[in-house]
Image (tube, grey):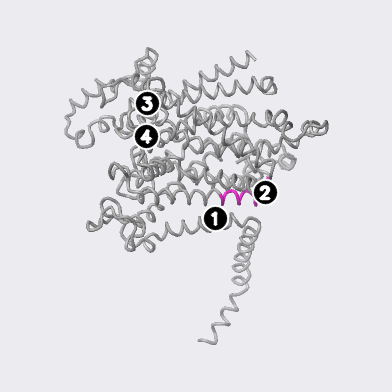
Amino acid sequence: MYSYIVRRLAFGLVTVFAVSVLVFVILRVLPGDPLVAIFGMEGFMKLSDAERANYMAQLGLSDPLWLQYFHWVRDIGSGNLGHSFFRAESVGEMISRRGPLTAEIAILSVVLSWIVGVPVAIVSALRPNSIAENFSRFLSILFLAVPGFWLGMLIVLGLLFAFGYRAPLAGASLFADPKANLQIVVGPAIVLGLGQAAYIARMARSSLLEVIREDYVRTARAKGLSGWPVIRRHALPNALLPVITLSGILLGFVLAGSVPVERAFGTPGLGYAMFTAVNERDIFVMQNLVLLYSVVFVLLNILVDLTIAWLDPRIRYQ
Amino acid sequence: MTATEPAAALALSPAAATTKPMWLWRVGRGLGTFARRSPLSAFWGCIAALIVVMALAAPVFAPYDPLKSDFRSMSKPPNERHVFGTDQIGRDVLSRVIYGSRASLTIALGAVMFGTTLGSFWGLASGFLGGRFDLISQRIIEFLQSFPDLILAMAIAMALGAGFGTVIVAIAITRIPFGGRVIRAIVLSLKELSYVEAARGVGASKMRVMLRHILPQCVAPYLILATTHLGVAIVIEAALGFLGVGIPPPTPTWGNMLADSLNAGLIPPWWLVLFPGAAITVTVLAFNLLGDGIRDILDPRLRGAV
């Protein structure tokens, strides 16, 4: 087990390094002049060559690329995530203020996806061709096609029309103001949770269908156990292993989905900050946020892999 | 003149009469089988075809010019003159939704043709050749997959600047790893089959085995993958448009129409939200179910794999 953990972590480290290089290449090396982004095309045209060079030097953009990369990594290492072009707040402060909200949404949506997805999968695996099965199949196909951010906009509009209700727009922490906090978080969590639940239900169903045909399940039935305990004690634990892995992969779906969904709900989380950064062409903020999202994604997937290895000895000894 | 025409047609007939109708007949029979085996998918396939026709012939279907403002009717809810209503500067929403299908389908198709295809060939090569090439390819693919796909697309689209080409590239790059993984897994299992060994045994070169014996087996999974990716690409394109890094206005796309609706005021008018989103949903649904149907017909074993 320990050698597995060490191997997995070492590979994770390499991945994080590669990801940082990729982020750097995409946002700094690809064509597109950061000064155009800051001043706009017209403002850029009005600058003289000397001014341009001056600004580039100030931003550290005229150094050689490897040095720029080195400075960036050094800054992150010392906890300095830089400033936005347009706002006083530093990126570090922004992350610590907005991050918890997005984290809450992500966790809540994963929990929700399991609460909805697994029972649906059990029903549709055990009662094939029943009304419940067809209904759940229809829903899971539908939710694969509905864009989360559109569903979010519809929910916001529907609540406004029906009850004149709108979730508070100012950020509120879970501990200072739990009521306002929950109102903010619930909407995006439901939208993202249902989106994931569709995938989870599909996966859990097919994996459960495979497992209940196995010999050991028949043995459990043969020794006289009735239907439900067989499923709960014998079939489900094995059937849910691939679902855990899928849940890890779906975290990417949640992290990415949080950007348009938070925009749709007007949630003051990190996703919304990324939307703002993209629209303002704020490459320094964008660079650090993309890195943060990817590193979180990589780390959580390592965690999922380790959990699976802990639960399933077959993987540990491969 | 009239008398000679049938004769001329007869003289031409051996080629024309046997090849063309035969070909048509076979396609027709294939579609018939498809419709019988999975009527639901066939139905949604028809809808997908309708959407493609709508995009191609947008000027015919659209009642108004999608870019022209009618300042006498701005922000009007659906009525008999504007079935889907008008937006805040008086453009007809129905026409914009119809024209929006052009951007969505062009970009989705471009992204799949470029991304999924490149990924599939990469997967074919790395699965078949194995060794160090495979090892390095696998690592690169894993690195690409460690970005949540929309975020990678956002970063690339932002860096490259807005436009058709850049959005296609941004979405295509997120599709490469998926194509690569699926096709590689299939090639790995094909490689062990005895007909491949037989081909090698009679002295076929590596290139020949890969292109003549393995590649044809990858066509079915590729088609299935491509239809599924079409749906994904449409959603990503809409999200990019919604976030302001897709095709810039005034060109109508479903994504930037939804983004526009949020600029219409504190409370977006419902018809500006409902119709573009419904268009995305129906299109994605159509391609996904068509993909399911194609999978069931071409290769039922792939259920769950793709």
Amino acid type at mark 1:
Trp
- Magenta segment boundaries in residue numbering: B289-300
To which chain does the residue with label 3 belong? Answer: A
Tell me the number on the disc at residue B44. 1
Pick the front one: A209 or A7: A209
> Is residue A58 positioned above or below B87 on the image?
above
What secondary structure prevails in the magenta region? helix
Task: Give neighbour class at mark 4: few <14, some 14-19, many 20+ (Cα, 10 Å).
Answer: some
- Would you say the residues marked 2 and 3 are in contact, meaning their CB atoms lie under 8 Å apart? no
Q: How many marks?
A: 4
In the structure shown, which secondary structural element does the residue marked by tag 3 occupy? helix
Task: Give neighbour class at mark 2: few <14, some 14-19, many 20+ (Cα, 10 Å).
Answer: few
> Where is residue B87 shown, x and y percent of the image?
30, 52
Eye-nearest disc, 3 or 4: 4
**Disc 3: which residue:** A287
In the structure shown, which secondary structural element does the residue marked by tag 4 occupy? loop
> Where is residue A60 shown, x and y percent of the image?
28, 20
Amino acid type at mark 3:
Gln
Q: Give the quarter of the image for residue B207.
A: top right
**Disc 4: which residue:** A167
Is disc 4 on the same chain as disc 3? yes
Task: Give neighbour class at mark 1: few <14, some 14-19, many 20+ (Cα, 10 Å).
Answer: many
To which chain does the residue with label 4 belong? Answer: A
Pick the front one: B124 or A173: A173
